[in-house]
Image (cartoon, helix red, strand yellow):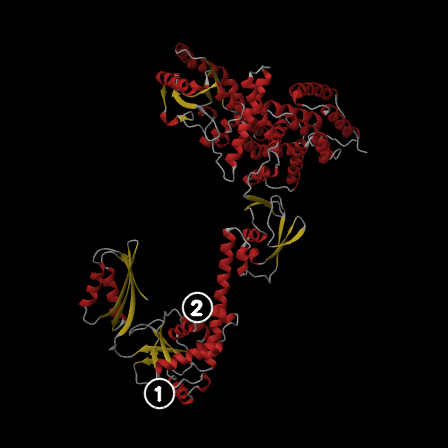
């Protein structure tokens, strides 16, 4: 059996004091038997030696009492939260189960403990806490809003107790968590006082020198600061009394953490921070006169001191979305020092001071989606109502019938808070990688979404996953808190049906891209296969005729044509037969169509070709007897263009430009069929070329272009196609021209036309 927890005399005395204080605060909310059952469970846990000190050496019973008092005083929680705090060490030690707690103390206490346990399990996964995702996951994991409030209070209490502990590394880690996780959470929940304390204590432990430097400076300047505040508020008090207001004024010094942040932001020393404090004028008046008296006070202050209009904040006319109301102005006080003045009523100040005003948007904490506004406003309203009930109880008031109804309504609100379950982030899930990294996905996202989020290759090869050590398919939906390890296989490839599995646009886009790349590869393979079959049949393939063949076969898109070839839905022989049919129909409309198998390469023609190509260069324009050559339609070469010849399977030669878009592929695959070529003599024929012209859609631009062409008698404009959209002019001009020298001259002239941005040969 483990050694029992040892209590020092100081701890025994402290426990007695804290217990009496806590009992006095929550006695009215306890149910019969609560105290006896709690004492029994605590004593049983201690006698069994199951409750031990934490890594800082702190007594868990003392810590629980301190945290319980803190949540009562600062947050306003009562029985269920206090019992959960006190029983948590017993549950952690295994002395009592959550089900037993629920049976003895009620479902609400069990629910709070269950939330605390789930978050403890979350921490064991060792995630990166310095992330917004982890804060959001923490909120979604807490079944009851009070779980988060208890965690914040517990961390504040822990930070108060670890000043002199020896475990420096553990203290550093706890302080970092307070700064990165708990302070922002407190800020979002409107617990401004606790948030400031967490930040100051974190700075104290993490930046020891900076903290005490600022603290010493504040102490050294306190007398001067107090004297200045007295000089500032003296005349103000007199004016407000003359106006008949009931009020009080107080000064608020910035927190040490806020001053440190301002020093870093402005890159200045302590003396360079001028707004070390703010003056608050708090008016006591009925609700119906709040705005009137606040604005009257504003007028009095601005009459006395010059205000800075750029620094004015009117949250009185239009309160913040979280309910915060106040007037903030900055005025030039005595000795030409800027002073911030906050004007509010007692009601407004009580809400703000107690943290209910939810400053979670204040100073850089931005709004979030997923129901955050509605959820936090619900908490704010519930806490605000709880403060009213607490005030009525503390004054021991005897309410009238109307007040009694109000009190019942407020108590009903507290009961609602007891049953409150968070549905925050219903549209988002948070999962862990095996390394503890935290990822966020929309609700309904699958394993395949996560795989593509990690890497495109991981997604493309995903076969499933191991979720919490359980093998699942890639169709499995993700749930918050899952630890997911993606499983892959090199034989796996994306499929069209995957688009119906994934939810994220990122995964869908990557799958579509992979499918498109696969289709392109298949199309290239099928194209090469067709070319090989055409060569075996000694049929020259013309690109234009091939396009017509595809359309005759009923295909609008080449991708569909090649896909059917790859899937064996379409037979290559059918394509060849249709191609030959169209080819013969163009050459001899009256000829009888014969099978492609009847055609063979003319050996005599091939012999002539071999003889004539013995020369190093094919000279275009010479009398090449028995040799057919023609200009390729893919690049439309004209006289003067650097060209080469390509021997076709039919025995003829196609003349291509050196910069033909198909030239690299022909050289790579059919280098043995490439023939050097050049033009002979001087060009006497006219060649068809097409120009693309882009420019501003200015009035008369078409006339200016056609005028240049018509002035040259050796140029013939065969066609012009115009398109105008969004102020841009796009046109294609088909022109008959003698050689490329004349073409270059023409293009230079067209580029000089006003508004023309681009002229290029297609």
Task: Please state the horizontal and vertical placement of residue 634, each as a whole percent of the image.
Answer: 36, 72
Q: Is residue 189 visible?
A: no
Task: Please state the horizontal and vertical placement of residue 163, each as a whole percent of the image.
Answer: 63, 26
Q: Mark 1 = which residue?
A: 626
Within-10-Å neighbours for mark 1: few <14, some 14–19, many 20+: some
Identified at 58% across, 44% down, the residue is 430
User: Between disc 2 and disc 1, whose residue precedes?
Assistant: 2
CA gap, disc 2 and disc 1 = 36 Å
Viewer-proximal residue, 222 or 258? 258
417 horizontally vs 750: left or right? right
Identified at 35% across, 82% down, the residue is 587
Tally the numbered discs. Answer: 2
| Vertical comparison of 689 with 93: above or below | below
Q: Is residue 11 visible?
A: yes
Viewer-proximal residue, 625 or 331? 331
Tag 1's secondary structure?
loop
Task: Please state the horizontal and vertical placement of residue 273, each as a whole percent of the image.
Answer: 45, 25
Task: Please state the horizontal and vertical placement of residue 637, each as a whole percent of the image.
Answer: 32, 73
**Displayed quadrant of residue 165:** top right
**Displayed quadrant of residue 302:** top left
Within-10-Å neighbours for mark 2: few <14, some 14–19, many 20+: few
Among all residues in the image, which is located at the extreme front?
Answer: 401
Quarter of the picture containing the N terminus is top right
Q: Mark 2 = which residue?
A: 558
Quarter of the picture containing the C terminus is bottom left
């Amino acid at each position: 059996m483990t050694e029992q927890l040892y209590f020092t005399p100081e701890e025994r005395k402290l426990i007695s004091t804290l217990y009496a204080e806590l009992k006095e605060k929550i006695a009215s909310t306890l149910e019969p038997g609560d105290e006896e059952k709690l004492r029994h469970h605590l004593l049983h846990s201690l006698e069994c030696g199951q409750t031990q000190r934490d890594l800082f050496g702190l007594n868990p019973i003392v810590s629980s009492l301190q945290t319980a008092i803190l949540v009562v005083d600062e947050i306003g929680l009562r029985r269920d939260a206090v019992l959960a705090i006190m029983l948590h060490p017993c549950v952690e030690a295994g002395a009592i189960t959550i089900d037993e707690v629920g049976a003895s103390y009620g479902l609400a206490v069990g629910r709070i403990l269950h939330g605390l346990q789930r978050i403890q399990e979350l921490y064991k996964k060792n995630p990166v806490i310095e992330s917004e995702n982890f804060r959001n996951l923490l909120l979604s994991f807490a079944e009851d809003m009070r779980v988060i409030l208890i965690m914040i209070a517990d961390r504040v209490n822990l930070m108060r107790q670890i000043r002199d502990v020896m475990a420096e590394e553990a203290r550093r880690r706890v302080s970092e968590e307070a700064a990165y996780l708990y302070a922002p959470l407190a800020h979002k929940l409107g617990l401004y006082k606790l948030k400031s304390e967490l930040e100051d204590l974190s700075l104290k432990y993490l930046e020891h020198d900076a903290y005490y430097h600022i603290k010493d400076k504040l102490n050294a300047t306190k007398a001067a600061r107090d004297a200045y505040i007295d000089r500032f508020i003296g005349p103000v008090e007199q004016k407000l009394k003359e106006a008949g207001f009931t009020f009080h004024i107080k000064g608020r010094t910035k927190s040490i953490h806020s001053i440190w942040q301002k020093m870093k932001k402005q890159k200045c020393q302590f003396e360079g921070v001028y707004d070390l404090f703010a003056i608050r004028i708090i008016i006591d008046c009925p609700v119906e006169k709040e705005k009137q008296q606040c604005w009257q006070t504003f007028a009095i202050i601005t009459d006395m001191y010059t205000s800075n209009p750029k620094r004015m904040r009117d949250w009185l006319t239009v309160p913040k979305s979280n309910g915060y109301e106040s007037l903030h102005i900055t005025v030039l006080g005595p000795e030409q020092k800027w002073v911030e003045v906050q004007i509010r009523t007692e009601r407004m100040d009580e809400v703000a001071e107690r943290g209910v005003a939810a400053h979670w948007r204040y100073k850089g904490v931005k709004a979030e989606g997923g129901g955050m506004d509605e959820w936090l406003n619900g908490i704010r309203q519930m806490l605000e109502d709880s403060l009213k009930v607490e005030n009525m109880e503390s004054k021991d008031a005897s309410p009238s019938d109307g007040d009694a109804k109000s009190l019942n309504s407020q108590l009903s609100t507290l009961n609602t808070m007891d049953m409150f379950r968070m549905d925050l982030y219903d549209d988002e899930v948070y999962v862990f990688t095996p390394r503890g990294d935290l990822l966020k996905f929309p609700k309904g996202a699958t394993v395949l979404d996560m795989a593509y989020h990690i890497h495109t290759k991981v997604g493309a090869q995903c076969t499933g996953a191991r979720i919490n050590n359980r093998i699942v398919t890639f169709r499995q939906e993700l749930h918050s808190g899952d630890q997911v390890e993606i499983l892959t296989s090199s034989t796996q490839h994306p499929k069209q049906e995957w688009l119906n599995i994934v939810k994220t646009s990122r995964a869908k886009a990557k799958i579509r891209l992979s499918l498109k790349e696969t289709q392109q590869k298949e199309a290239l393979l099928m194209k090469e296969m067709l070319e090989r079959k055409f060569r075996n049949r000694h049929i020259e393939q013309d690109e234009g005729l091939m396009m017509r063949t595809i359309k005759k076969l009923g295909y609008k898109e080449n991708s569909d044509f090649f896909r059917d070839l790859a899937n064996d839905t379409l037979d290559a022989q059918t394509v060849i037969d249709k191609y030959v049919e169209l080819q013969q129909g163009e050459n001899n409309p009256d000829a009888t169509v014969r099978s492609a198998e009847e055609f063979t390469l003319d050996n005599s023609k091939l012999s002539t070709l071999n003889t004539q190509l013995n020369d190093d260069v094919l000279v275009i324009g010479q009398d090449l007897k028995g040799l057919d050559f023609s200009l390729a339609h893919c690049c439309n070469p004209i006289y003067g263009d650097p060209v080469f010849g390509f021997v076709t399977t039919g025995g003829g030669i196609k003349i291509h430009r050196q910069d033909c878009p198909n030239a690299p592929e022909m050289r790579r695959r059919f280098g043995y069929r490439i023939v050097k070529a050049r033009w002979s003599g001087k060009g006497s024929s006219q060649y068809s070329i097409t120009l693309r012209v882009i420019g501003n859609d200015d009035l008369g631009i078409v006339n200016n272009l056609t005028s240049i062409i018509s002035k040259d008698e050796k140029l013939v404009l065969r066609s012009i196609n115009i398109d105008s959209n969004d102020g841009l002019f796009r046109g294609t001009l088909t022109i008959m021209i003698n050689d490329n020298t004349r073409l270059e001259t023409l293009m230079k002239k067209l580029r000089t036309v006003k508004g023309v941005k681009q002229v290029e040969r297609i």
